Image (cartoon, rainbow, N blue to C red):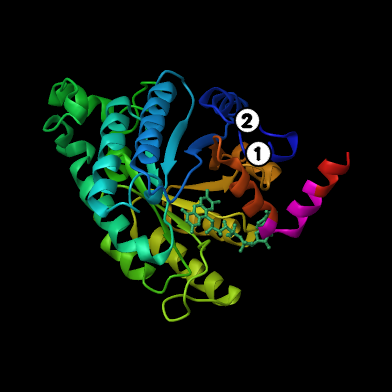
Amino acid sequence: MIPPIATRFVAGTSPATALEHVQALDDEEVGAILNVLGEHHADPDAVAADVDAYRSLVDSIARTAFDACISVKPSQIGLDIGSEEFESNLKRIVSQAAERGVFVWVDMEDHTTTDATLEAYERLAREYAPDRGARATEPADGEPTESAASETTAAATNGSGEAVDEDRAAVEGVLGLCLQANLKRTREDVERLADVPGKVRLVKGAYDEPKSIAYKEKDRVDEAYRTLLEDAFENRDGGIAVGSHDPEMIDYSKQLHEEHGTPYEVQMLMGVRGDAQRDLAADGVTVYQYVPYGSRWLSYFYRRVRERKENLLFAVRAILS
Ligand SMILES: Cc1cc2nc3c(=O)[nH]c(=O)nc-3n(C[C@H](O)[C@H](O)[C@H](O)COP(=O)(O)OP(=O)(O)OC[C@H]3O[C@@H](n4cnc5c(N)ncnc54)[C@H](O)[C@@H]3O)c2cc1C
């Protein structure tokens, strides 16, 4: 059970409480990106448990009409054990999600994980591209294989089984990857993903990276973020997610969208600028909220509180009242 103080940032400990929150978001036309809290699992049993949790979550989402998807952390599903373990677990999740028409995001962790994450992402995004029907070739865990035709249809549906724009689905695929503006390599990584079906979530970057490979000053990170947005809106056909709470970046994305016509979505965290999320959605912008849940809520909650003075004040006020 999560104390009320943490429920601003975490949607309970179970899929049921998380889906209740998704229902409330749905009422406000805000989509949800569900994350089972957990990272850096070195224990294969913990990895297996979280892979199963995501696969079961995918089934739960597919049974609803909500606009919801999932986001997984590489070190949660095996990267700390090895890159092959990570890729095969990601594939198990993606295979199931593709069959159910549920989109999968891959979070990006610190720079030591970037290459392995990109490589696995790129292979799977190509393999599960909706127009290639590649999912017909290999069942997940020996589960019955459906026909290529029915799988292709599944790829062009959303979680509620409704048909989605097929051109859009072909561009965006079933997978998306987070890329971090604070890493100097990211411009090249975006170029590398130019012809890979899938979405790209641009964020400023949450990890304290060495200065040899990363921009450290806020101004420099903001400048890199702006440049990445410009490149993305000019050169991508779609599938751009703006993962930021920064009003300046959100306004700039709107401006770039109006200039280039490129579709995009805004993504923010649960508990952060909720009013802005609702206002943007009411203005017709596609908005997704990143919704973490699960028993490992404490360290996530501390991170949110540490990163911003207002969150700390909120926490103290909640304790005092
Ligand atoms: C959906 C989502 C997914 C993410 N996934 C990843 C990931 O996979 N890997 C990764 O490294 N990082 C990830 N991040 C975190 C990201 O890298 C940043 O660390 C984080 O979003 C802070 O940067 P910012 O752009 O939001 O704004 P900042 O540069 O921190 O702040 C800029 C402005 O935004 C506003 N703002 C920011 N935070 C708040 C707040 N709490 N309350 C009110 N206003 C605020 C303020 O006006 C502030 O001046 C993710 C972020 C989001 C939203």
| Residue 14 higher or lower than 132, as above or below | above
Give residue 7's quadrant in the image: top right
Stretch in magenta: 306-315
Q: Are marks 1 and 2 in contact (CB under 8 Å)?
A: yes
Identify which residue is drawn at 55% across, 70% down.
222
Q: Residue 118, image x and y in percent?
A: 30, 57
Residue under circle 2?
28
Identify which residue is drawn at 33% across, 43% down.
175
| Residue 190 higher or lower than 48, as above or below | below
Mark 1 to mark 2: distance in Å? Answer: 6 Å
**Ligand 1 shows up in which quadrant of the image?**
bottom right
Identify which residue is drawn at 56% across, 55% down.
244
Cβ of mark 2 under 8 A from ligand 1: no
Residue under circle 1?
278
For badge 2, the amino acid type reads Glu
Tell me if 158 is positioned left or right of 119 in this view: right
Q: Residue 290, image x and y in percent?
A: 54, 42
| Residue 66 higher or lower than 2, as above or below | above
Q: Quadrant of the N terminus?
A: top right
Give whichever of 247, 290 is nearer the camera: 290
Give whichever of 318, 173 is nearer the camera: 318
Does the stretch in magenta take in 19? no
